[in-house]
Image: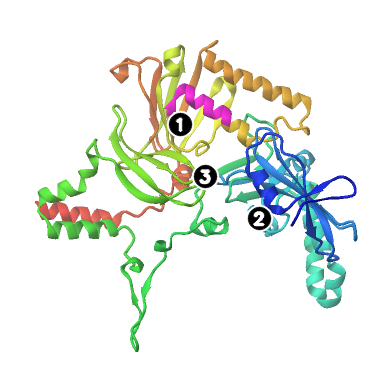
Amino acid sequence: MSEKMEGNGEQIVDVGSVVEAVSADDGDAPLYNVESLCMRCGENGITRFLLTLIPNFRKILLSAFECPHCGERNNEVQFAGEIQQRGCSYSLEIPSGEQKMLNRQVVKSESATIKIPELDFEIPPEAQRGSLSTVEGILMRAANELQALQEERKKATPETAEAIDQFLVKLQACATGKSAFTFILDDPAGNSFIENPFAPSTDPSLTIKFYERTSEQQASLGYLVDSTQAEGTHEAPEGGEAVTTHQGRREPHGSIGASAGHRAIAQSNSSEISEALFRYTAPEEVMTFPSSCGACATKCETRMFVTNIPYFQEVIVMASTCDACGYRNSELKPGGRISEKGKRITLYVKNVNDLSRDVIKSDTASVKVPELDLELASGTLGGIVTTVEGLITKISESLERVHGFTFGDSLDENRKSRWIDFKARLNKLLSLEEAWTLILDDALANSFVAPSTDDLKNDDQLASEEYERSWEQNEELGLNDMDTSSADVAYESTNTTKT
């Protein structure tokens, strides 16, 4: 489509020019006008695109369509930035009579699903896609869309129309604050958001969880799914039956490792077994295996290195690099067995040397700074290897990214000044104007803070205590249902054979 000028002086460009423009990192993107088809009257209308940046949130692409022939209008919000590494799930408990909670701002991306379990109600990704609204606005829009075709339903299927009328009464009661309900926003792309008015402090009514995407969710976001994960079958010869490959073979829970161990014992002697099974512990070896880039889904390489950290345990360091898009990612995984108890590490930060202490924070550890009433739930920053100074810096960057409306136009001056004051206090931690306390609470005891002395006991600023995990913590970690009976039997039989 060639470029031309409208009578009002606005320039109409082709779609390719818009894509190139929004893909660039220019700070000031102009308003683009694209001629597009109106789905109501079939004539051509104008779609306007504007790439903008929500402060402390992400790049978004605003699109607004208007047809001068029939007056049709619609608008949409799309995310111009990258898909996040993990999905996110927001759960907001709204009690009855709390009208203020209905005014919380909500960003629903085109891949997000909204659920209200009390009503068994779900807004799929294709409905209200790319919307910027409030809790009340989303519920009222859903009610209006259900109400729009009620007259036709009453003529065609009166029973269905009556059931929808009864449901609309319940939905409107939730939207007006008369009924208590739970508002769940689940986004595999990690680009959705619910405002926290108490930010940067925690909100007792709002729960945020980050999770690894399933293969189905990866496919829905446009990523390539590894076909080797599926069960494969060989084509059947003429007149014969299909033969299932070894990939689709089922093994009893917990017995795969035991079966491999039995095969190794039957085929080798003890020295060869120990050399083969424990070869990865050699400190000079870095293993490389193929993987997929988390940003562009291109095949890349992941390097894995196993090492022992003094005063801590064995850890696995994994790093990925993509030659296609330049994406880099590093992650730390604990090695060895699961600890029987959790661990709480307390560091009293008093001088500059304390800021340089090495810190290993696993993805199951929560972070607390009592002097600021700051608490980060487990999984917020993932598993990272950094220093005390680096951890505080990452916390500051994470708060700015997650709480996207802290400096928006809709924020009142009181809350805006409170956030600015908190950020100033957070920066004071690094200037060490006052001593402060850092607490890492890890239910799996996989976190670590380096001591300043050769002997851990001589470091009077560093303290750690072990505690028994609660049933709820074991349930969240999946330990209550873990079955190791098959492995226990295999180990017992192996020990008997050696004896």
The alpha-carbon separation of the residues under discs 3 and 2 comes to: 27 Å
Give how far across and how far down residue 211 sits, in percent.
Answer: 52, 47
Name the kind of residue labelled 1 in the image. Asp
Question: Where is residue 122, by image quadrant?
Answer: bottom right
Foreground label between 1 and 3 = 3
Residue 105 as seen in the image, left or right of residue 302:
right
Residue at 68%, 22% in the rendered image? 420
In the picture, which quadrant includes the N terminus?
bottom right
Mark 3 vs 2: CB contact within 8 A: no
Q: In this orientation, which residue lies closer to the viewer: 121 or 403? A: 403
Question: Where is residue 52, by image quadrant?
Answer: top right
Local packing at callout 2 (Cα closer than 10 Å; few below 14, some 14-19, many 20+) is few
The alpha-carbon separation of the residues under discs 1 and 2 comes to: 31 Å
* SS for callout 3: loop
* SS for callout 2: helix
Upstream in the sequence, badge 1 or badge 3?
3
Upstream in the sequence, badge 1 or badge 2?
2
Residue at 38%, 52% in the rendered image? 482
Name the kind of residue labelled 3 in the image. Gln
Q: Is residue 25 magenta?
A: no
Label 1 sits on residue: 441
Residue 485 as seen in the image, left or right of residue 229:
left
Residue 85, labelled with which disc?
Answer: 3
Label 2 sits on residue: 117
Query: Magenta stretch?
Result: 386-397
